[in-house]
């Protein structure tokens, strides 16, 4: 599987996803269809409506800032944690627990504020920053402004 | 040195009052506008309105590494980020964090935040102590690794007249001494428990409740 480059090859990866919003639910559906074993955590019951019938994993209703919820999701067994809630601080705390407390080999988190990236990466967490991604895309779309024809 | 209190309404107010009367400089940081207005009227502290887990807010506080930095919001994630930013970006030596979920204490400590206070834990211990206060005193209430308990034998105790070796105490506990009518008896396997004995028991906190049950019956 391409996203596990560099990791130990396994038949089935165990992925825990935090936040079942637009991004989390899509990732959950896709990972399920790729044959991963997926658990998704959200504190709103109605969020799980976004999961499609491709999704074959489990959902856990709970606040992931409580350590017990992370234990219930069996984070200690996870190969990958995707931390995709809409709050940077919540994502930081979940990712750090995943990394330092549960020793998850790969932790990927979303950070909206570019100022927070450093803190995530200091702890060995891979960061996706939608703000920077959008900035790059828009810059590319406006490439003519610099006068350079690309 | 100044004292910087992030979030937490009542707690922050009363802590601020306490430190102000002792002559310290106090700074309150809070997201809530109404609270900030109220505090500005009541306290001679510097009030900053904003989210204290955000770098651009902490930037304005002119933090010095010797400042006492305390995060008191009702959200553990915000307290963690505020303290990490304070220590890593502004060099604060020992930020203090409040945790709402006592289990998160271990997580904070792994991240290098060594001063972690859990009000839930403190209240829990106080309540448990007061529940059993009549016959039990925890002589070392702040320790997490060992409990030293003082337990009085009442007429309801199920072990009266029994020899120590026959008492089914959990493995991680031991009766260290018995105070009997002002004399100290160092117990042996064949020492028999009498009514009115005061037992000094060493135990791991995890087996504390089964110690109570064994020695005092249903509690």
Image: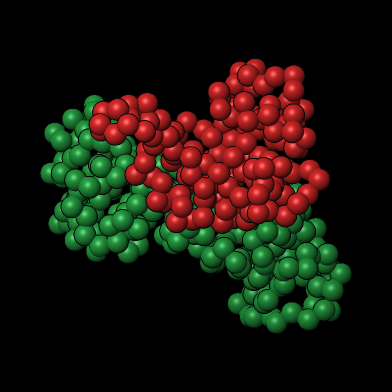
Q: Quadrant of the C terminus of chain A?
A: top left
Q: Residue at x 25, y 46 (%)?
A: B58
Q: Residue at x 22, y 47 (%)?
A: B59
- Give the colour in which the image draws chain B: green
Does B88 sit above or below residue A95?
below
Frontmost residue, A141 versus B198:
A141
Image spot of residue A30 (x, y percent): 68, 29
Frontmost residue, A116 versus A137:
A137
Frontmost residue, B45 versus B85:
B85
Does A42 sit above or below residue B57?
above
Q: Residue at x 36, y 48 (%)?
A: B82
Q: Residue at x 22, y 35 (%)?
A: B49
Quadrant assignment, res B78: top left
Frontmost residue, B117 versus A75:
A75
Q: How many marks?
A: 0
Q: Quadrant of the N terminus of chain A?
A: top right
Tell me if A124 is positioned left or right of A10 in this view. Answer: left
Quadrant assignment, res A135: top left
Tell me if B115 is positioned left or right of B205 in this view. Answer: left
Chain letter for red, please: A
Tell which residue pokes out farthest to the right in this image: B166
Would residue B140 be seen by someone viewing this image from the given angle? Answer: yes
Image spot of residue B23 (x, y percent): 15, 57
Image spot of residue B107 (x, y percent): 53, 54
Image spot of residue A115 (x, y percent): 34, 44
Would residue B35 be seen by someone viewing this image from the given angle? Answer: no
């Amino acid at each position: 599987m391409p996203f596990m480059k560099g990791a130990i090859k396994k038949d089935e990866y165990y992925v825990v996803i935090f936040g079942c919003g637009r991004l989390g639910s899509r990732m959950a559906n896709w990972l399920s269809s790729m044959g991963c074993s997926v658990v998704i955590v959200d504190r709103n019951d109605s969020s799980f409506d976004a999961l499609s019938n491709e999704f074959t994993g489990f959902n856990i209703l709970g606040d992931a800032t409580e350590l017990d919820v992370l234990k219930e999701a069996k984070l200690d067994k996870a190969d990958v944690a995707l931390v995709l809630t809409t709050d940077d601080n919540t994502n930081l705390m979940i990712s750090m627990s995943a990394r330092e407390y549960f020793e998850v080999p790969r932790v990927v988190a979303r950070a909206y504020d570019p100022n927070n990236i450093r803190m995530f990466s200091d702890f060995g967490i891979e960061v996706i920053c939608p703000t920077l991604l959008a900035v790059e895309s828009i810059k590319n779309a406006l490439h003519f402004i610099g006068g350079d024809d690309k | 040195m100044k004292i910087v209190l992030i979030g937490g309404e009542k707690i922050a107010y009363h802590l601020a009052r306490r430190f102000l009367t002792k002559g310290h400089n106090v700074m309150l940081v809070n997201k809530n506008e109404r609270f900030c207005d109220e505090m500005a009227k009541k306290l001679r502290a510097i009030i900053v309105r904003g989210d204290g887990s955000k770098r651009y807010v902490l930037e304005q506080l002119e933090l010095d590494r010797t400042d006492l930095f305390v995060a008191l919001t009702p959200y553990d994630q915000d307290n963690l980020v505020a303290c990490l930013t304070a220590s890593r970006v502004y060099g604060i030596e020992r930020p203090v964090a409040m945790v709402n979920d006592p289990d998160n204490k271990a997580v904070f400590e792994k991240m290098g935040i060594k001063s972690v206070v859990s009000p839930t834990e403190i209240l829990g211990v106080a309540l448990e102590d007061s529940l059993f206060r009549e016959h039990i005193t925890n002589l070392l209430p702040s320790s997490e690794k060992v409990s030293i308990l003082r337990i009085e034998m009442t007429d309801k105790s199920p072990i009266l007249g029994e020899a120590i070796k026959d008492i089914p105490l959990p493995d991680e506990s031991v009766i260290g001494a018995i105070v009997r009518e002002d004399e100290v008896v160092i117990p042996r396997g064949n020492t028999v428990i009498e009514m009115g004995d005061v037992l000094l028991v060493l135990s791991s906190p995890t087996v504390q409740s089964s110690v109570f049950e064994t020695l005092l019956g249903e509690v």
